[in-house]
Each structure stands twice: as C-alpha cells, then as structure tokens.
Amino acid sequence: MQQIPVSLWTLVAGIVVTVISIWIGQNHTLMPVQASLQAPLVDGFFNVMFTIAIALFLVVEGTILIFLVKFRRRPGDDTDGLPIEGNVPLEIFWTAIPTVIVLLLGIYSVDVFNRMGGFEPAGHPHSAAHVAHQPGTAIAATLSDRSETTIAPTIGIGASPETLNKPADLVVDVKGIQYAWIFNYPDSGITSGELHIPVGADVQLNLSAQDVIHSFWVPNFRLKQDALPGIPTELRFVATKPGTYPVVCAELCGGYHGSMRTQVIVHTPESYDSWRTENQIAQQQNLNQVVAINPADLSTSEFLAPHTHEMGISAATLDSLVIGH
C-alpha cells in the first residue's frame, strides 16, 4: 500500500482548518444585535480577527495532539530523544506569518477607525445655551440669557467621511458623575437620565466628566468613548434600529461603578417628537412651579419638609421641634 505524502495531508488539513475557521468566524453569536451604522464595521473587523484566531487555535492545538500520539513514548523505550537543535526555515516561517497578520490587521483597523469618524472629531468654538427660554419670570429670563462659549471636542469619534463638514442632526451634552449619566438637550432645554434619540438621525454626544474618568459604552452600537474631567470628548453615530439598549460605564470609577447604568431609547421620528414635546411641557411646568414658590412665604417646617429624610428625622418630629422652638 502506497503511503500518502505528508504534503497531501498538509493540504487537506489546511482546507479543513480554513473551512471550519471561516464558518465559525462568520456564524458565531458572540455579539449583541447591531443597532447603529457603525456596528457592521466593527463586527466585520471582529469576525476577521476571530476567524484568524480559530485557524491558529486549530493548527496549534491540532499539532500538539498529533505529536502527543505520534511521538509518544512506547513501552520499554528508554532511549533518548532525537538531538534536534533547530530549524531556521521553520523559525522564519512561524515568525513571518504572525508579523504579516498583525500588520494587515493594523491597516484594516485604521481603515475602520477612519470610516467611523475617528480621525475627524470637531475642533472649533461654538456657543451652547443649556436652558430653554421660559418667558414671564425674571429667573427664567436670566437663565435663558446664559450661554457659554465652549470648545468643541477634539478627541473621540467624530464625523465620518460621508458626513464630513455637515452638522449633526441632534447634539446632546452628556455628563458622567459618580454614579450616573446626565443628558442635556441644548436645543430644547430637556434634561434626562436616559438618552432618547430618533432612528436614522446623525447624533453627536459631547461627553464630559464631573469627577473622575468614566466611559460611555453602548454594546449594541459597538461604540465606547471615555468621558474625561476637563477634556471634552465626542461620540457621533447613527442608530439604525428602534429599541431600548443598555448604556454601561466601562471605566472603573468608584465603589458603585457596577451600578452606573442607564439606557438609550431609539425612537421612530414620530415617537421622538412626542417624547420631546411631552418633556418640554413637563419641564416648563416644573420650572414655573419652582419660580412661583416664594421661600419667604413658607413656614420653617414647610421649608425644611423636603429635607427631613436627609436629616434623619420624621415630619412629625420636625413639627414638634419647630413648635417647641
């Protein structure tokens, strides 16, 4: 019986490894549902890396298993192993292949980063008014006149090559604090603990941190950007699928870091308009109620009532203390 050449076995093994690694690399379920225009770019890069990793794993572990069987120590064999000192061509091969792979992945990653807008963050002064105009009250008039000149972020994910030099459809100021995210909409004056955006809109998040470094991460968008104290950063994206997606702080920021979570709600355009209108009306009513209350007209117990919990006493105890005083 004629022995099958090693080269033919190598060819067959290479084909099998290639087919298995490509199938696993393209059909895994490791990533959450894609919900942004940038997600397919990241997933494409991840799939390539995962395919290469599967191929290398099969080659290395397969070789180890074959060698364990073929070159195992036979019963009664007490001789020394062959005195193999090295193989220069093999060492060059297994050094050159990983080098080429790393270089190609590096070039690919730079292309993905550029297509996502990593090389085009903003960088020019702009004026941002953070409070909507509420006519009829002196306090509201004062707040509406407050606007500050800020420097647009120069770090982060900015405009993609397709949206270069085009203003974003929606700008949201995002502040990270221990341990929450605060979302402010400069164009409407809305402040929220959740991010609400319309599907298909080009959204720009201006990120900042009040205390320590936080990291704004939306797994479904495949996007993550640090929020740095004193250094503005930017995250620009387009959501493609309505739904509710988790927002996670991915930077250890303190003892309650694990609970620093919120959600981004991607609306249809009609649903977003309804949410915006409802919240503008609600916040206007709240502001009017605050302005209408004159602290000078409140009794001591009424003035301190909202703070009884922080003071560690009950409302009844507060009334008795005030009356006794």
Image (cartoon, rainbow, N blue to C red):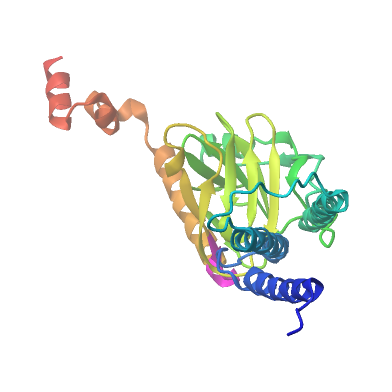
Q: How far across and down, in percent of the image, does residue 39 sit?
A: 67, 63
Q: How many labels does the image show?
A: 0
Q: Is residue 134 visible?
A: no
The span shown in magenta is 265-271
Q: In the picture shown, does residue 292 fall above or below 75? A: above
Q: In the picture shown, does residue 176 fall above or below 58? A: above
Instruction: Assign the N terminus to one quadrant of the image.
Output: bottom right
Of all residues, the one furthest to the top in this rendering is 325
Q: Which residue is drawn at 81% across and 40% down?
A: 123
Q: Which residue is drawn at 83% across and 53% down?
A: 90
Residue 105 picture quarter: bottom right
Residue 37 placement, left or right of 311: right
Using the image as rendered, state which of residue 267 and residue 111 is in the foreground.
111
The answer to whether residue 269 is magenta is yes
Q: In the picture shown, does residue 121 fall above or below 276? A: above
Instruction: Assign the C terminus to one quadrant of the image.
Output: top left
Q: How far across and down, in percent of the image, does residue 223 sit?
A: 64, 53
Using the image as rendered, state which of residue 220 and residue 6 is in the foreground.
6
Using the image as rendered, state which of residue 161 and residue 140 is in the foreground.
161
The answer to whether residue 21 is magenta is no
Of all residues, the one furthest to the bottom in this rendering is 1
Residue 125 picture quarter: top right
Q: Is residue 247 visible?
A: yes
Q: How far across and down, in percent of the image, does residue 36 sit?
A: 65, 64
Using the image as rendered, state which of residue 8 and residue 294 is in the foreground.
8
Q: How far across and down, in percent of the image, does residue 292 sit?
A: 40, 39
Residue 217 placement, left or right of 289: right
